[in-house]
């Protein structure tokens, strides 16, 4: 279902393929809830985030957020001259910031005023991160970790001296997918959800995206509630390749054999909607599908695999839609399922042939934690923004 609104002329969310000033990543905080439960995951997650930072720094500068207690380790890992572009370290207080910068950091938008001292300036929208619907609430924390996470967007914008735009909507950057031409795709499950926006109507939410991001056509797909932490973020499901073209993540052959799979149902619902919808410019959407890897091939830890199959752990985020576009390049995941990895890589190379250099990063820990490359990153568009 799509709703159309007249977008505000105040702000505009550039597409991911627009020029970046830099990309933000974060080393995971040493005392975040997950790493206390699985101590080995801290080192593994740090290695994978660092590999993503290395890949991004081939194309553009990186800002790496690091707790002060780990600053010397980060300085050693990213010594000057080891990457083409600078990896600048941004120290923070506290040890409970998680690595998911797509969701915890601000979502950057650009002013669209044609004249004036702040014309085309980059601003940051604070979408009131609440731990993905307060899923990690404890007696001593708010959302995931502590106020370090909940207040991070505000703190980072203050540190970077970028204007903060307040919002009435609670959401995360991974729930937002735009084409830079006024179209947004999102799942109802991750935004029109009482764990984030109780009492807000669809129309209220759409009006706020029009105001803060310049959206004038929002295509909703149902998604899936209460199965994994994000409630089915769009950035692991449907992505814009370019205006008028989307990449859709298709459940693996292994998953498709499960007739009761909520993911197969969500996929079929999305195919039906996307194939009928038009974008803000009136174009039908071309849909390219990439099959997800089989979990049994991708998960190296047999004990972990048994726990997933027994539904003792949430489903991992093994999908190829969670890539990141950077200046002249694209950072693309590989998971260890050789056949699926090769097929997906060939598809993405064909889609971006002559446009972008594809750099792969092998992931295992981040998907088991529920995310990937896109989830771990947040780009800052170049300023002043050029339409």
Image (cartoon, grey):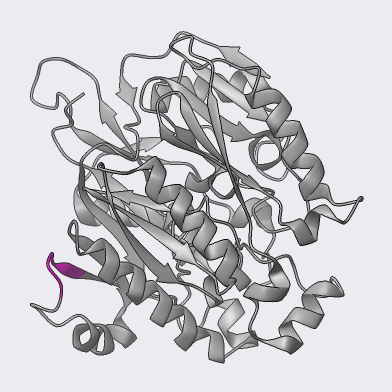
Image quadrant in which the N terminus is located: top right
Left or right of 53 in this view: 306: right
The magenta segment is 83-88
Q: Quadrant of residue 25?
A: bottom left
Please tell me whether residue 95 belongs to the stretch shown in magenta: no
Q: Residue 39 at what x, y percent from top left? A: 57, 91
- Residue at the spot 35% in from the left edge and 68% down from the top edge: 52
Q: Residue 8 at what x, y percent from top left? A: 38, 14
Q: Residue 242 at what x, y percent from top left? A: 39, 31
Left or right of 353 in this view: 200: right
Residue 19, visible in the rendered structure? yes
Image quadrant in which the C terminus is located: top left
Q: Quadrant of residue 120?
A: top left
Q: Is residue 93 above or below residue 253?
A: below
- Residue at the spot 28% in from the left edge and 50% down from the top edge: 157
Q: Residue 270 at what x, y percent from top left? A: 69, 33
Number of marks drawn: 0
Left or right of 169 in this view: 179: left
- Residue at the spot 62% in from the left edge and 62% down from the top edge: 317
- Residue at the spot 53% in from the left edge and 46% down from the top edge: 235
Residue 144, visible in the rendered structure? no
């Amino acid at each position: 279902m799509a709703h159309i609104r007249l977008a505000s002329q105040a702000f505009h969310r550039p597409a991911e393929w627009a020029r970046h000033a830099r990309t933000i990543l974060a080393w995971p905080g040493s005392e975040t809830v997950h790493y206390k439960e699985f101590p080995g995951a801290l080192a593994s997650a740090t290695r994978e985030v660092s590999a993503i930072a290395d890949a991004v720094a081939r194309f553009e500068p990186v800002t790496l957020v690091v707790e002060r207690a780990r600053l010397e380790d980060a300085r050693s890992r990213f010594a000057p001259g080891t990457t083409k572009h600078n990896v600048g370290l941004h120290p923070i207080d506290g040890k409970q910031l998680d690595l998911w910068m797509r969701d915890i950091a601000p979502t950057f938008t650009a002013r669209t005023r044609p004249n004036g001292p702040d014309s085309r300036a980059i601003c940051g929208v604070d979408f009131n991160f609440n731990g993905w619907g307060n899923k990690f609430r404890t007696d001593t924390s708010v959302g995931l970790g502590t106020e370090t996470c909940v207040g991070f967007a505000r703190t980072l914008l203050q540190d970077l001296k970028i204007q903060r735009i307040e919002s009435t909507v609670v959401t995360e950057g991974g729930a937002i997918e735009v084409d830079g031409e006024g179209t947004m795709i999102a799942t109802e499950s991750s935004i029109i959800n009482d764990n984030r926006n109780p009492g807000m109507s669809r129309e209220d939410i759409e009006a706020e995206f029009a105001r803060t991001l310049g959206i004038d056509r929002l295509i909703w797909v149902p998604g899936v509630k209460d199965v994994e932490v994000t409630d089915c973020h769009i950035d692991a499901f449907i992505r814009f390749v370019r205006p008028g073209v989307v990449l859709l993540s298709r459940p693996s052959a292994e998953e498709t054999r499960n007739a009761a799979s909520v993911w197969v149902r969500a996929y079929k619902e999305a195919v039906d909607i996307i194939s009928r919808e038009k974008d803000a410019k009136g174009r039908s959407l071309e849909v390219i599908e990439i099959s997800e890897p089989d979990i049994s091939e991708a998960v190296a830890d047999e004990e972990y695999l048994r726990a997933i199959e027994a539904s003792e752990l949430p489903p991992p985020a093994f999908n190829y839609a969670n890539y990141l576009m950077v200046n002249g390049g694209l950072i693309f995941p590989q998971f260890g399922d050789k056949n699926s990895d090769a097929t997906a890589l060939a598809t993405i190379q064909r889609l971006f042939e002559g446009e972008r250099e594809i750099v792969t990063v092998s992931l295992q820990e981040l998907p088991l934690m529920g995310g990937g490359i896109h989830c771990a990153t947040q780009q800052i568009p170049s300023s002043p923004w050029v339409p």
